[in-house]
Image (cartoon, rainbow, N blue to C red):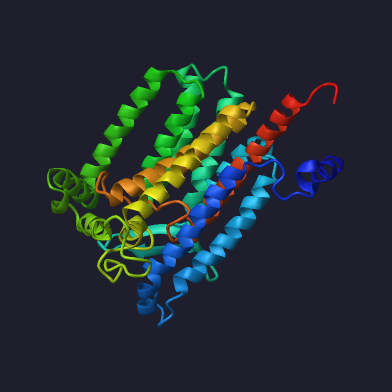
Amino acid sequence: MKRWVQWINSPVFTSNRLDNGIDHVLLYLTLCLVAIGILMVYSSSSMLAFELYQEDSFRYLKVQLIASVLGFVGMICASRFPFHYYERHAKKILLLCLIGMLLVFSPLGYSVRSVAGGEFSRWLRIGGTQFQPVELAKLGVIIYVCQFLQQKRNRIHTFMRGMVPSLLILTIAFLLLFKQPDFGSAVLLCAVVLVLLFVGGARVWPIVFLGVFALGLFYVAVLLDPYKLQRFQDYIQSLKSPYSGSYQVSLSLNSLALGGVLGSGIGDSVYKLFYLPYPHTDFIFAIIGEELGFLGGVVVIVLFMLLIWRGIYIARRVKDRFAGLLAIGITTLIGLQAMVNIGVVAGVLPTKGITLPFVSYGGSSLLVSMISIGILLNISRKMNMRMEIRHISPLS
């Protein structure tokens, strides 16, 4: 009990400054993306909400605002919460995340049907609130892998004792995601873990072997699922002719083209009017391109690039190995998710149900993404504290 009292009374929690020592650039970049998301969620979803929710055109906006406020509170709390807590309790956090993913198949689970007719079991419904456990599971897996790489850093060069335990956990998470099904999140999580293994010191040839093996499994999974196979065939066809691919991508490209350089203006999108499926989630970047034009799309991309740069900067400057790995894992997750979403909208990548972090509609994604940024801010505080100590003169 005494240790807990000392911990709560530590400077991290008792400082009078809300932003004591945190990376202001990362904070402002995140808030800019969230603000753009709030604006574009309303613009892209107002007519859809008016049609679906008894003429309540603000329905999606209100949910996004609530998620933004909760996310901001979670970000501030996470920025003041010592990151070593996650290292000490990584296994418990992972277990809770896996249990949450299992609960989607229980009576608490909530299923929806896609435009293509497929059924997805990805949500938990408790009362009137829905939550997507996979968003928290991504962060939980990253924390566990970082803790394992820190604890077993002397064994990471060996395949059986260094890499296999992490891969077993990844396999369990992958199977649960594949069952939901959430193929996009499974691929994304595999990529993040492989990056962490590489940064953590694993040998290159086992990572290459595992990458090739994973690609083989994904190829088999695509062949066994007619829906995924059709998407892949549409993507191959779109490489020959951009407008001969899937229906969503064709409309997305039309939306981007219609925006031109300066865009049609906020609220004046045509393709959000029941033409483009999921204009407020998976394809919100297409609406950004249509209403804000090429320049607006470039601004969003630059904001993500700066955020990724800042995350890498924090990871390189912090001296704690676990903190550095965790910063890389979070930055990679956000960066890859943004890259995949924008790549799908532009027809560069196969169509996947991956949202644009901080921008797309979705309370679970926004909440967990902002909490993840809060963890990065806490790591940056540790970095800044070390830098301040380094620059103080012994005579001062």
Locate residue 395: give its quadrant.
top right
Pick out the residue farthest to the bottom.
54
Q: Is residue 177 left or right of residue 149?
A: left
Locate residue 322: give its quadrant.
top right
Q: Is residue 178 visible?
A: no
Seen at 50% across and 20% down, the residue is 201
Pick out the residue farthest to the front.
262
- Residue 154, given in percent of the width and then of the height, sits at 57, 17
Q: Is residue 156 visible?
A: yes
Q: Is residue 47 left or right of residue 6?
A: left
- Residue 156, given in percent of the width and then of the height, sits at 51, 20
Locate residue 3: give its quadrant.
top right
Seen at 27% across and 42% down, the residue is 221
- Residue 223, given in percent of the width and then of the height, sits at 21, 43
Image quadrant where one finds the N terminus: top right
Seen at 75% across and 28% down, the residue is 389
Q: Nearer the viewer, residue 20 or 180?
A: 20
Figure label count: 0
- Residue 169, given in percent of the width and then of the height, sits at 48, 36
Image quadrant where one finds the C terminus: top right
Q: Say if 201 sits above or below 41 in the image.
A: above
Q: Is residue 267 left or right of residue 11?
A: left
Q: Say if 303 sits above or below 259 in the image.
A: above
Q: Nearer the viewer, residue 111 or 304?
A: 304
